[in-house]
Image: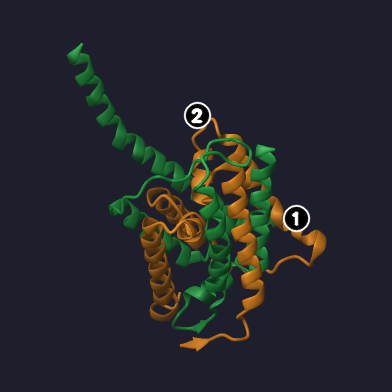
Amino acid sequence: MNVDWASFSPWPALAGGVLIGLAATLLALANGRVAGISGIIGGLLRPSLPDALWRAAFVAGLVVAPIAYVILSPAPEIIIDAGYPTLIVAGFVVGIGTRYGAGCTSGHGVCGLSRLSPRSLVATLVFMAAGFATVFLTRHIFSL
Amino acid sequence: MYLFCAFLAGLVFGLGLIVSGMASPAKVLGFLDLAGRWDPSLALVMAGAIAVGAIGFAIAVRRPLTLLHTPMLMPTTRTIDRRLIVGSLLFGIGWGLAGFCPGPALVALGAGYLKALMFVAAMIVGMLAFDRIEERRIQPVAQAASVRAGAME
């Protein structure tokens, strides 16, 4: 295995992870909810749900985060190499997949593993493996 | 207060994604590319988040009510079925294609990236498609049930 030491950023990664853990803890202790982002968005798309307000508030916080961040620091580096057709296909598949599998990196990966849920462990292992396989195929086999 | 806490949780979550570098698909793909020049950062993001979250959820699951005296609504599903596997498989493929999962895509959208907007729009279409498929799957069952209930009356 060839580690990219120049890109590896252990301290910001850990610090950011701690913030994510604190956010999930706050939503659990104050709102009684799991910070699963695909589920929160999915619930917003069903207007009959009475709890649309807290979902909208959480999503607003996420969207506002980069604006709050630039008050204190230079703009974050966000590099999106994928082209539009790839982004559209990927977005659609992520949308269906996360709803069908009832969770994504946040709901299953962070919250589910924190709750020691075997179901979330299986989901996390499956989407990690699928992610590894997809990048292997696109970068090293088909060189897209 | 209930809504403010939800907003604050979203804000801190988003800041965590930015600080950790995970708002950038290139950084995420660096982790998913095991055969290339591998960037292990995402593993440490998960480790940090789970270390803190494990304490938070351990406290949360022991409480019948939240700190704001509302019901504690933690997931109760425990089944490991085909839906979980197929759904997670599809999600992982999409994640590997663009390097975006739902949270970072919303953060990048807030940072003003048109590409993130396209991803989020397509993701919402995918979620709506899921709802449609679910309606079709559930409705015939519900209709059959109501017919049966009618016959019993």
Q: Secondary structure at mark 1?
A: helix
Evaluate whether residue B23 shows in this view: no
Rendered orange, the chain in question is A
Say if B100 sits above or below A64 in the image. below
- Identity of the residue furthest to the left in this view: B151
- The residue positioned 81% from the left and 59% from the top of the image is A71
Q: Are marks 2 and 1 on the same chain?
A: yes
Q: Amino acid at mark 1?
A: Ile
Rendered green, the chain in question is B
- The residue positioned 46% from the left and 67% from the top of the image is B96
How far across and down, in percent of the image, does residue A5 sit?
Answer: 59, 86
Residue B142 appears in which quarter of the rendering? top left
- Identity of the residue furthest to the top in this view: B153
How far across and down, in percent of the image, does residue A44 sit?
Answer: 54, 39
How far across and down, in percent of the image, does residue B27 sit?
Answer: 58, 72
- The residue positioned 44% from the left and 83% from the top of the image is B35
- The residue positioned 49% from the left and 41% from the top of the image is B73
Give the Cα separation between the discs numbered 2 and 1.
Answer: 31 Å
Say if A1 sits above or below B5 in the image. below
| Residue that label 2 marks | A48
- Identity of the residue furthest to the front in this view: B62
Marked residue nearer the N-terminal end (2 or 1):
2
